[in-house]
Image (spheres, rainbow, N blue to C red):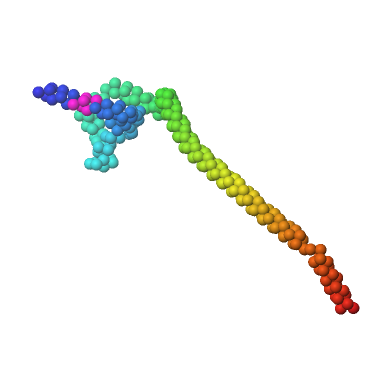
């Protein structure tokens, strides 16, 4: 019965994880929340070279800061006093080996750790180099796409400016044609005015010539002689008055 329940639980978890993976793959993006990227683990803090920090934190809430050390010393004293841990000749050999290992760790440990950390960082950077190159390529592609969009927006502005330029040219051509029509109408009206003025002057001149010729024709030689004599007499009278 328990095995059936366990199998059902495992199957349910697998189906849920499959659904999450399918959901992430359908959207085309990595599910960073349910499936985060693996991160290289760092070793935790230790005391005395080999005892984890968590063991000391377990005693702090109940015994204080000196509790873990008191517990360790008391436990070692109890084991040695009750001869649960027998100190035979192998113990002293192990103690001497521990001292040599401790001295070697203190002397050669930091340079070796620095060298190993450097090697690990080099391997990690080599692994991440391809990923970083891909990210850089994608960022450059995004920047190029944004630049293309900006250039496309500039093309729209250029097209709009060209449309306005065409409208200005049409307006200039329209005004030029209006001015041409105005000048042509004015020229024709001036022509009609000059024509009417010339016809009126010719008519007046013709009328004056006609009247003068008719008047000259209506004057007889006797009337002309009498008029000439009268003029001479008037001139003689005016000359006599001036004297």
Residue 111 visible? The answer is no
Looking at this rendering, what residue extends furthest in the right direction?
243
* Quarter assignment of residue 100: top left
Which quadrant does the N terminus fall into? top left
Q: In the image shown, does 158 or 21 lie closer to the viewer?
A: 158
Residue 21 at what x, y percent from top left?
Answer: 27, 27
Magenta-drawn stretch, dominant element (helix, strand or loop): helix
Tally of numbered tags? 0
Residue 179 at what x, y percent from top left?
Answer: 59, 47
Q: In the image shown, does 194 or 76 lie closer to the viewer?
A: 194
Q: Is residue 186 above or below residue 102?
A: below
Q: In the image shown, does 82 or 154 lie closer to the viewer?
A: 154
Q: Is residue 218 left or right of residue 129?
A: right
Residue 102 at what x, y percent from top left?
Answer: 37, 27
Residue drawn at x 27%, y 38% is 57
Point out the stretch of residues depicted in magenta: 12-18
Residue drawn at x 15%, y 24% is 8
Residue drawn at x 17%, y 26% is 9
Residue 230 visible? The answer is yes
Q: Is residue 65 above or below residue 122?
A: below
* Quarter assignment of residue 84: top left
Residue 14 at what x, y percent from top left?
Answer: 22, 25
Q: In the rendered structure, does residue 235 fall within the stretch colored magenta?
A: no
Q: Is residue 214 left or right of residue 69?
A: right
Q: Is residue 197 above or below residue 167?
A: below
* Quarter assignment of residue 80: top left
Residue drawn at x 63%, y 51% is 192
């Amino acid at each position: 019965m328990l095995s059936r329940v366990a199998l059902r639980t495992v199957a349910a978890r697998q189906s849920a994880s499959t659904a999450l993976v399918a959901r992430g793959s359908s959207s085309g993006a990595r599910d960073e929340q349910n499936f985060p990227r693996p991160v290289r683990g760092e070793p935790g803090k230790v005391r005395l070279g080999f005892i984890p920090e968590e063991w000391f934190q377990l005693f702090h809430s109940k015994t204080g800061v000196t509790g873990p050390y008191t517990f360790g010393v008391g436990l070692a004293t109890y084991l040695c006093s009750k001869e649960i841990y027998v100190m035979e000749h192998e113990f002293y050999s192990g103690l001497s080996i521990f001292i040599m290992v401790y001295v070697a760790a203190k002397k050669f440990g930091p340079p070796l750790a620095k060298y190993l950390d450097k090697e690990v960082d080099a391997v990690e950077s080599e692994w991440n180099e391809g990923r970083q190159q891909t990210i850089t390529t994608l960022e450059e592609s995004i920047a190029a796409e944004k630049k293309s969009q900006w250039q496309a927006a500039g093309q729209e502005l250029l097209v709009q400016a060209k449309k306005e330029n065409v409208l200005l040219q049409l307006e200039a051509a329209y005004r030029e044609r209006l001015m041409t029509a105005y000048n042509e109408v004015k020229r024709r009206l001036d022509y009609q005015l000059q024509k009417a003025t010339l016809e009126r002057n010719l008519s007046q001149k013709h009328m004056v010539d006609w009247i003068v010729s008719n008047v000259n024709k209506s004057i007889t030689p006797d009337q002309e002689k009498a008029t000439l004599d009268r003029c001479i007499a008037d001139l003689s009278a005016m000359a006599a008055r001036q004297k």
